[in-house]
Image: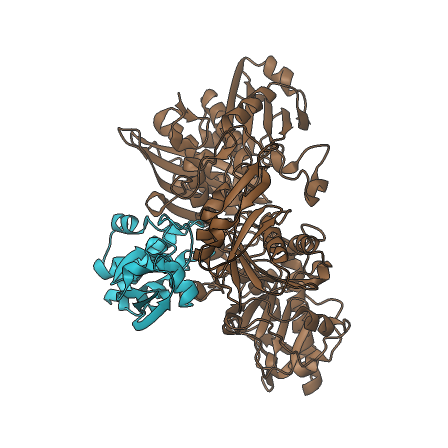
Chain colours: A brown, B cyan
């Protein structure tokens, strides 16, 4: 297996696809406008005059190589491997001859079907949205290869079979590799439909296939945007405002311009860029640059001011996101009442690869290299910035060194910055790499929003929950973006997901949302709404169980009797964790939580120990996941393990805080994330399923925080209502 | 002011400012891209290389400080331990986004070259300077044990 970025010129492929009815044979000219590293990544073999490309998702070369075209970015979640697996399965390809290539930006062919008409990756949708599309692509191509062999051998298709990249007749007389059949298959019309495999016949789906991208990620050859080097390329660093909303009043380029290697200093809408021959010169130039910022309209409040406003808003009527029965009166008349409030900070995504993009801009073309997550959105924003038609913007999607939501932003901030710098430089075709530093990343905004949650519940005489009232206060992620259409009745679904749709069988439920506004730019962060709602719901239900004098697992299980998939993962996690095997020794505790996120169900049991000084150690996490048909159990396990580590770091330490509008953190010394010595043992159990596959990149994050907090309560008798937990706000 | 170093067993003369961090000299002057930039302040380990066999953070090491010394990057990893680590990384399927893994592999190799059979606690201690935001830590730990066994065999 090998992987490469899309390096076939768009125009070439366009021409190639014009003949839409048939799978045209063409002498495909592979046009490299850029040289060097791309060639090493493995291009279409020069001698492959004949190619079979029946659709936008695969092509077979004369040497038998199958190239799968991935419309989704590979940012660690395993999308390339999953996409290749599904195509290869229905194609009956030889897995060792399958390669992956990234698709160009093209909403017509490569839209995310879960998003509608845009191409992009997010919401753990890569496999879910393309499952049938990729299966059909593979199956149709397989049918054509069989037809080609049938014609060649004069044997009916029904007497032929394909396996491992080879077509044979059932009598065993004839054999032809896919490569042998490319020429004749390419002259056939693409069938309207093709029979898909019965899942019981899957050979690749469901197996722990090795990831296609792993070898290159173990020897330093995987190509990230950081690694793009083009002839004459310059490196730019951008000085951005110290407070969100500030603008450049004036700047003095003198000292920066005097740094050896600094080529040009330009003002752009987002700040002042120092363009240099290399990173170090650009960095020193930016350090020396003097900018006078106009902070008239900047956000000058601190996190504590903002949270104070949120606490106040939680006491006022808000907009209803769900109303079943009459929660207010049910709680009012209940013999016992519970209430709690939770406070969540801004969070940075902090992917390991700081944001970066390479732009080569001329007066009539724009070429972009990036770990691009929102291809057609970025294409449109780049085009607008450059003053070009979107068709003139060509995006090469490279491996992304993590994202966690950061590279999927409707404003395309880092792409737009890079294009605006290239434009200010003169749009003369000089490739420019915009490089963010870690400080730029931590202070650059687009955070997971701050939220305040207030919950109240009434308990009946038998400890049953009679009413549930949940108020959420925080900024909207979707406001002002092309996704604002996802608003329903004034509710930003990303603010209430995981809360408005709680699965617990409670007769009276109300969930309300107060949407706030401030000057801090926000964005989705891994598992989006459920990064905070699941905590509030699962920590509070735990309190209710405790107040009812019931076991935390049994209490939930009873309330999920009508929700088999939620209950399924809950049961499995509890069983595998030995929940009912008796109490843990003194100083240890177990907590449980369950969530549905992006139609995937996850339950986790966390075990902690607390020493005499109060130091908490997370020892073990048992995770059960139901993501429908498991495409690759090892990738699923890896995503759960990673989600648990990501969620644990955020729960313990994650916080971006503002003081007088300035971000207090700057790098990994002050924005603390999980490290090796803090990673617990993890066990992942996958629920067998034949349902359509759902996503695994994000859901594993959701239950970790509350399961941890519930475990801390079990060990210490104390609960925590303010994030991050390591700040020590435990209350009895 | 050029600086000469032994980079992956070859003497190279790098024409760069002496205060340029080794990371950027390796990447932008020598053109080896396996070593990554993650934080610039020695807090994440993505830039880990070996200096005379010891793991260092190349993002805070000025080029002038390594004049005449032996620098090994992921591209030059040839030792038995190094090869065992890379093979184990594939066997255990460690990487996700993969960006930090060159640094992880260099730190793990340095550990195994000193301590052929590290315990979990020793692994945690040697590897806690290398951040992985994908949190592949469970597999890193497992892969180091795998590499330890295979290097011994």
The residue at 57%/71% (across/down) is: A34
Foreground pick, A530 / A485: A485
Foreground pick, A266 / A477: A266
Residue B110 occupies quadrant: bottom left
Count of marks overlaid on the render: 0
- Give the left or right position of residue A99, taking residue A675 as reference: right
Percent position of residue A597, x then y: 57, 42
The residue at 41%/52% (across/down) is: B136
Percent position of residue A91, x then y: 61, 70
- In this rendering, the answer to whether A607 lies above or below A7 is above
| Residue B125 seen anywhere in this rendered image of the structure | yes
Percent position of residue A547, x then y: 47, 20
Residue A132 occupies quadrant: bottom right
| Residue A218 seen anywhere in this rendered image of the structure | no
Percent position of residue A499, x then y: 59, 32
- Give the left or right position of residue A288, taking residue A516 as reference: left
- In this rendering, the answer to whether A635 lies above or below A168 is above
- In this rendering, the answer to whether A682 lies above or below A259 is above
- In this rendering, the answer to whether A527 lies above or below A728 is below
Q: Looking at the rendering, in which quadrant would you find the C terminus of chain A?
A: top left
The residue at 64%/83% (across/down) is: A49
């Amino acid at each position: 297996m090998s992987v490469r970025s899309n390096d076939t010129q768009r125009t070439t492929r366009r021409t190639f696809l014009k003949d839409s009815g048939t799978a045209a044979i063409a002498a495909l000219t592979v046009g490299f406008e850029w040289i060097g590293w791309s060639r090493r990544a493995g291009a279409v073999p020069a001698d492959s005059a004949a190619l079979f490309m029946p659709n936008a998702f695969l092509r077979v070369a004369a040497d038998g190589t199958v190239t799968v075209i991935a419309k989704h970015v590979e940012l660690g979640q395993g999308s390339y491997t999953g996409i290749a697996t599904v195509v290869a399965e229905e194609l009956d390809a030889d897995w060792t001859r399958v390669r992956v290539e990234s698709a160009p930006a093209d909403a017509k062919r490569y839209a995310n079907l879960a998003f509608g008409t845009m191409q992009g990756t997010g919401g753990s949708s890569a496999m879910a949205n393309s499952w049938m599309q990729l299966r059909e692509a593979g199956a149709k191509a397989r049918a054509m290869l069989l037809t080609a062999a049938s014609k060649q051998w004069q044997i009916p298709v029904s007497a032929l079979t394909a396996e491992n990249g080879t077509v044979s007749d059932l009598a065993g007389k004839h054999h032809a590799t896919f490569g042998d059949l490319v020429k004749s298959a390419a002259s056939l019309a693409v069938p309207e439909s093709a029979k898909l495999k019965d899942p019981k016949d899957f050979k690749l789906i469901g197996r722990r296939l090795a990831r296609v991208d792993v070898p290159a990620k173990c020897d330093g050859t995987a190509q990230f945007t950081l690694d793009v080097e083009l002839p004459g390329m310059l490196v730019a660093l951008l000085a951005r405002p110290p407070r969100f909303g500030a603008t450049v009043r004036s700047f003095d380029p003198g000292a920066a311009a005097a740094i050896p290697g600094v080529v040009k200093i330009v003002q752009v809408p987002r700040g002042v860029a120092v363009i240099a021959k290399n990173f170090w010169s650009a960095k020193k130039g930016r350090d020396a640059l003097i900018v006078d910022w106009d902070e008239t309209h900047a956000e000058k409040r601190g996190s504590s001011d903002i949270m104070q406003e949120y606490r106040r808003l939680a006491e006022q009527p808000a907009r209803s996101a769900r109303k079943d029965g009459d929660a207010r009166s049910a709680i009012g008349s209940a013999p016992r009442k519970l209430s709690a409030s939770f406070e969540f900070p801004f969070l940075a995504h902090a992917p390991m690869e700081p944001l970066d993009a390479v732009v080569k801009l001329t007066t009539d073309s724009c070429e972009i290299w990036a770990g691009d997550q929102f291809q057609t959105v970025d294409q449109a924003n780049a085009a607008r910035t450059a003053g070009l038609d979107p068709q003139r913007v060509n995006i090469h999607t490279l491996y992304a060194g993590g994202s966690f939501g950061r590279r999927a932003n409707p404003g395309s901030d880092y792409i737009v910055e890079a294009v605006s710098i290239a434009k200010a430089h003169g749009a003369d075709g000089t490739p420019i790499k915009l490089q963010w530093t870690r400080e730029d990343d931590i202070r650059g905004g687009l955070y997971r929003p701050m939220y305040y949650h207030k919950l109240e519940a009434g308990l009946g005489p038998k400890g049953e929950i009679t009413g549930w009232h949940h108020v959420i206060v925080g900024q909207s992620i979707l406001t002002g973006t092309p996704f604002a259409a996802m608003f329903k009745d004034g509710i930003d679904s990303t603010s209430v997901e995981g809360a408005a749709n709680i699965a617990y069988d409670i007769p009276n439920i109300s969930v309300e949302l107060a949407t706030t506004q401030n000057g801090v730019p926000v964005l989705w962060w891994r598992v989006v709404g459920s990064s905070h709602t699941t905590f509030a719901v699962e920590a509070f239900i735990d309190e209710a169980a405790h107040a009812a004098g019931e076991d935390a697992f049994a209490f939930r299980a009873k309330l999920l009797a009508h929700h088999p998939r939620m209950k399924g993962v809950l049961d499995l996690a509890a069983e595998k964790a030995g929940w009912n095997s008796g109490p843990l020794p003194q100083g240890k505790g177990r907590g449980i939580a369950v969530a549905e996120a992006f139609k995937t169900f996850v339950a986790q049991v966390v075990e902690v120990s607390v020493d005499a000084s109060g130091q908490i150690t997370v020892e073990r996490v048992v995770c059960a996941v139901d993501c429908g048909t498991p495409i690759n159990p090892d990738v699923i396990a890896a995503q759960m393990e990673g989600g648990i580590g990501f969620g644990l770091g955020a729960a313990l330490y994650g916080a971006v805080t503002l003081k007088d509008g300035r971000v207090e953190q700057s790098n990994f010394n002050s924005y603390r994330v999980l490290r090796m010595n803090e990673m617990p043992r993890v066990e992942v159990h996958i629920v067998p399923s034949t349902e359509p596959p759902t996503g695994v990149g994000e859901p594993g994050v959701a239950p970790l925080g509350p399961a941890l907090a519930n475990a801390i309560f079990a060990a210490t008798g104390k609960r925590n209502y303010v994030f991050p937990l390591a700040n020590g706000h435990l209350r009895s | 002011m050029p600086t000469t170093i032994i980079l992956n067993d070859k003497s190279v003369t790098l024409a760069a400012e002496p205060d340029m961090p080794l990371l950027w000299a390796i990447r932008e002057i020598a053109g080896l891209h396996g070593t990554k930039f993650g934080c610039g302040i020695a807090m994440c380990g993505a830039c880990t290389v070996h200096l005379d066999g010891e793991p260092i953070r190349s993002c805070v090491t000025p080029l002038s400080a390594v004049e005449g010394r032996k620098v090994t990057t992921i591209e030059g990893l040839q030792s038995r331990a190094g090869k065992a680590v890379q093979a184990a990384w594939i066997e255990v399927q460690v990487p996700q986004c993969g960006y930090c893994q060159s640094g992880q592999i260099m730190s793990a190799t340095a550990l195994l070259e000193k301590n052929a059979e590290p315990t979990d606690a020793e692994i945690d201690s040697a590897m806690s300077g290398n951040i992985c935001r994908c949190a592949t830590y469970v597999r890193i730990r497992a892969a180091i044990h795998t590499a330890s066994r295979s290097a011994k065999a």
